[in-house]
């Protein structure tokens, strides 16, 4: 029930946003045209679908349409501001690469500013309208809760805290007759599973929510079938297993209903945008750093014998293997000399790290200090082997020595930078601490966290907190 209503409401919001952004486009053109003479409107019509796509995709990625009615005004305005800034940066990058002479930065800025203002007014109006509607008592649905466990109590607390959902609990049903008349979260137990038909006959029930333990599943089949017969919708809590890191969600494959436990907390839309961001960011980096590549390449070849690039097999998403690229910072036979240096390892666990590696070339130490040797990995990001942000890619032989829980760091695509990178990676010598940071990143992953890590990586690299 809730999911269907939320899906319908989300479609209405998307349609409203499309109309508002469209209006903002034409309004901006006419406002700017009055100040400066612009080309005919036909020249700018291609901007409209790009603008609409940026706003809607970024809104979806940053969670504007997730639990909209539960968001505060400040949360809504903060999302709009972030989307406006990010959208302006992306659009300006397109404008810069395509060298569109008849577009100006001031026009693009005004375009996103007007859109942001109108969208803010639209969102706040919708929010106030629905809050007012709920307070007036319209559009409430009577629901019956089955179960008195922690999940049922949590659900009832959330119903009490969010009247905007329009749910009214009429009572609780439990399997234990001794609980009749007792109250939980302010609601009484009005019946048991044995007098199920009588309970539904005494009250007007629009929806039934089952929050029951696994050993109750056989007992609720008959009540669910009765609800099916009389036409009352039913929802059953799917988190019947106690998973430490993941939450179950309903899915369907080939017509078969399933409970899916995702290894990461990200939504499909956010992961798609993460990949889109990786492509755009890595492509820009490859173009911007092209002069740096040339200079570093000359220095590497001029200061030591051997190939320009160091290629090595690494592991990424779910154990997939790929060739990682770096500017070579060590002597050509560095891999062959590894065995004689293993006793100098300063890192616990299966990883090899030493501060003053004798295999480094004259320019190699400098390149590592400022992470310049990592620049070719933007190509790995562009082709999809890596992401801008994610756990650093391990060697296959390191992965073979992982404990099972440590292999969870492969549940996300390997990255250029991560929490370990910005937490003083050269000073972290405990492999368990490194793993903890990666697990923390995976557990709390969001686009917002990625942006924070990217912003904190820049000063970490500039001050030379490089790898060993």
Image: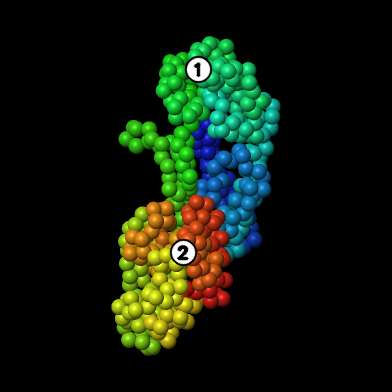
**Residue 13, percent from left and from top:** 55, 40
Quarter-of-image position of residue 317: bottom left
**Does 375 appear above or below 268?**
below
Residue drawn where x is 47% and y is 36% of the image:
239
**Does 468 appear above or below 180?**
below
Q: Earlier in the sequence, mark 1 or mark 2?
A: 1
Reading the image, the residue beneath label 1 is: 193
Q: In the drawing, what numbered circle is on residue 365?
A: none
Q: Is residue 322 visible?
A: yes
**Does 33 appear above or below 299?**
above
**Does 461 appear above or below 249?**
below
Residue drawn where x is 43% and y is 45% of the image:
262
**Residue 344, percent from left and from top:** 42, 77
Of helix, strand and loop, which one carries label 1?
A: helix
Residue drawn where x is 42% and y is 56% of the image:
406
Residue drawn where x is 64% and y is 23% of the image:
183
Quarter-of-image position of residue 336: bottom left
Residue placed most toward the observer, 75 or 306:
306
Residue placed most toward the observer, 61 or 360:
360
Q: Is residue 33 visible?
A: no
Q: Residue furthest bottom?
A: 302
Mark 1 Cα shell of 10 Å, populated few (<14), some (14-19), many (≥20): some
Q: How far apart are the two marked residues, 1 and 2, measured between alpha carbons?
A: 53 Å
Number of numbered tags placed on the structure image: 2
Query: Viewed as shown, does residue 400 lie left or right of 193?
Result: left
Reading the image, the residue beneath label 2 is: 431
Residue placed most toward the observer, 250 or 31:
250
């Amino acid at each position: 029930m809730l999911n269907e209503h939320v899906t319908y409401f989300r479609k209405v919001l998307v349609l409203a946003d499309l109309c508002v952004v469209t209006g903002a486009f034409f309004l901006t053109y006419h406002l700017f045209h009055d100040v400066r003479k612009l080309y005919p409107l036909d020249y700018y019509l291609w901007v409209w679908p790009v603008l609409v796509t940026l706003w809607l995709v970024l809104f979806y990625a940053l969670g504007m349409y997730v639990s909209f009615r539960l968001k505060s005004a400040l949360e809504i305005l903060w999302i709009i501001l972030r989307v406006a800034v990010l959208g302006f940066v992306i659009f300006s990058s397109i404008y810069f690469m395509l060298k569109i002479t008849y577009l100006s930065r001031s026009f693009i800025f005004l375009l996103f500013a007007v859109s942001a203002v109108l969208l803010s007014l639209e969102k706040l109006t919708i929010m106030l309208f629905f809050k007012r509607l709920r307070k007036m008592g319209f559009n409430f649905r009577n629901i019956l809760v089955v179960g008195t466990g922690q999940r049922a109590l949590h659900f009832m607390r959330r119903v009490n805290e969010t009247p905007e959902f329009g749910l009214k609990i009429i009572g609780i049903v439990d399997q234990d007759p001794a609980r009749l008349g007792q109250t939980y979260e302010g609601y009484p137990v009005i019946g048991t599973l044995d007098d199920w038909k009588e309970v539904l006959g005494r009250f007007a029930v629009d929806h039934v929510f089952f929050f029951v333990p696994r050993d109750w599943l056989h007992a609720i089949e008959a009540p669910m079938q009765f609800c099916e017969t009389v036409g009352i919708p039913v929802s059953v809590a799917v988190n019947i297993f106690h998973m430490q890191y993941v939450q179950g969600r309903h899915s369907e494959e080939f017509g078969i209903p399933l409970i899916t436990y995702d290894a990461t907390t990200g939504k499909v839309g956010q992961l798609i945008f993460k990949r889109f961001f990786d492509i755009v960011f890595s492509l820009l980096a490859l173009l911007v750093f092209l002069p740096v590549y040339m200079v570093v390449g000359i220095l590497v070849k001029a200061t030591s014998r051997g190939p320009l690039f160091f290629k090595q097999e690494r592991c990424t998403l779910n154990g997939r293997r790929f060739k990682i690229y770096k500017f070579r910072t060590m002597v050509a036979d560095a891999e062959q000399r590894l065995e004689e240096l293993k006793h100098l390892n300063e890192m616990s666990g299966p990883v090899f790290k030493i501060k003053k590696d004798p295999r480094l070339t004259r320019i190699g130490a400098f390149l590592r200090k400022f992470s310049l040797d990592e620049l070719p990995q933007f190509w790995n990001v562009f082709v999809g082997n890596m992401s801008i942000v994610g756990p650093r890619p391990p060697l296959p032989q390191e992965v073979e020595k992982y404990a099972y829980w440590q292999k969870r760091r492969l549940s996300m695509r390997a990255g250029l930078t991560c929490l370990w990178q910005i937490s003083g990676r050269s000073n972290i010598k405990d492999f368990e601490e490194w793993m903890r940071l990666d697990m923390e990143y995976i557990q709390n992953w969001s686009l917002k966290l990625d942006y924070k890590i990217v912003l904190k990586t820049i000063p970490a690299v500039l001050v030379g907190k490089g790898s060993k």
